[in-house]
Amino acid sequence: MFPVNSIRRLRATFQPDMFHGWGRNRKYFEGWYFKVVSTDGKYALAFIPGISFSEDGSSVHAFIQTMYGSENKAAYERFDSSAFKPSPKRFELQLGENYFSNEKMELNLPDVQGRIDFQHTTPWPKMFGAPGIMGWYSFVPFMQCFHGINSLHHQLDGTLKIKGEQVSFTGGKGYIEKDWGRSFPKAYVWMQSNHFERLDRASLMASVAHIPWMNSWFAGFISGIWLEDRLFRFATYTGAKKHLEIGEDQLSLIYTNPKTELRILAHKAPGTELVSPLQGEMTGKISESLQARLEVQLLENDRIIFEDTGHHAGLEVAGDTDCLL
């Protein structure tokens, strides 16, 4: 018989939104990213629950990191690892008095309390040989970092008490993704928005990263743009090509498939310092903005089928990105 933890990890391979770290006890991290934006756009926050095991396994703790996008501030709450209680059958996490799933989150943090329900979630579609956004790389056991998307786009219903102020998120928009593995890439670009001016049901996630591979490395990329139930993929494993330019105030990213092309011009904004994993331990530092702006064009057969501007965009440009250009 297979050990229970092996069976649970195998199940999670085909359901990337679930917890993958069953039986791990060293050099490992896993975390989910819940972004919520109020209807008026005044409040843009991200909540990141997760767990961290140091390289030698001597230090382990759970955490919830809160990002206040409009204030460019963050908070990091530590929990004993015993408070981290994921479900072995679906994505469902109890962390102290806080709860997270694809259907809702309930928060009881020092500065944030309340509940938000997620309606009409949009999971990344599964395909044969590609259970998530990473395609067949999902099955490679030695990847430094794995990535998944729980919901590209959903509506919010609920209220949070933020630093003593009651804030309604009903009618707002949300997004959920996750990462797990040993460390974030040593250099990467990541961006996301599902707040477009002309099309309400649209979402974009795009990234380029330094990927260790065998005794070498490559600049890998994954991206998806979802437009009213149609998803366009651009990734290393689809055979797409990419062109990246990074300037002081903006960056340009172009993906090309044989019949489609995605053009993104990202305008940077002041960021918030967040804690990130290094060899499993939350000792790194990155800067993320939730106020960036993305100008997006999507072409199919040389014809523009989507042109819009995304607001409240998450944007990270981390490490020595020269290797990505």
Image (cartoon, rainbow, N blue to C red):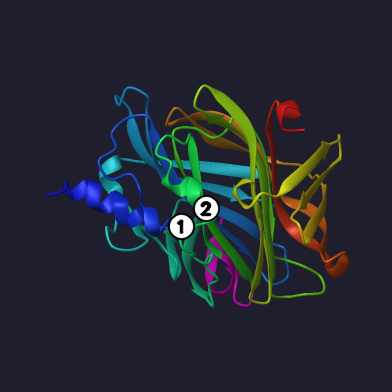
Q: Is residue 91 above or below residue 171?
A: above
- How far across and down, in percent of the image, does residue 240 sit? 70, 50
Mark 2 residue crowding within 10 angstroms, few (<14) / some (14–19) / many (20+): some
**Residue 179: % across, % down:** 49, 46
Q: Is residue 260 left or right of residue 249?
A: left
Residue under numbered circle 2: 135
Task: Identify the main secondary structure in magenta.
Answer: strand
Q: Is residue 320 one of those drawn in magenta? A: no
**Residue at screen point 55% across, 71% down:** 122
Q: Nearer the viewer, residue 119 or 211?
A: 211
Give the amino acid at mark 1: Gly
Name the one closer to the observer, 147 or 61. 147
Residue 267 position, x and y percent, is: 83, 48
Q: Is residue 164 visible?
A: no
Whether residue 162 is in magenta: the answer is: yes
Q: Measure the C-alpha gap from mark 2 to mark 1.
A: 7 Å
Question: Considering only order in the chain, which callout, 1 or 2, is on the residue closer to the N terminus?
Answer: 1
Residue, x 53% and y 30% (percent of image)? 213
- Identify the residue position indicated by label 1 in the image: 129
Numbered marks: total: 2
The quadrant holding residue 77 is: top left
Residue 292: assigned label:
none
Q: Nearer the viewer, mark 2 or mark 1?
A: 1
Looking at the image, residue 231 lies above or below residue 281: below
Q: Please, is residue 159 above or below residue 256 in the view?
A: below
Between residue 132 and residue 248, name the one nearer to us.
132
Q: Secondary structure at mark 1?
A: loop
User: What's the magenta region?
Assistant: 152-171
Residue 225 % position (x, y): 69, 62
Q: Element under label 2?
A: helix
For the residues labelled 2 and 1, say whether their Cβ atoms are less than 8 Å apart: yes
**The C terminus lies in quadrant:** top right
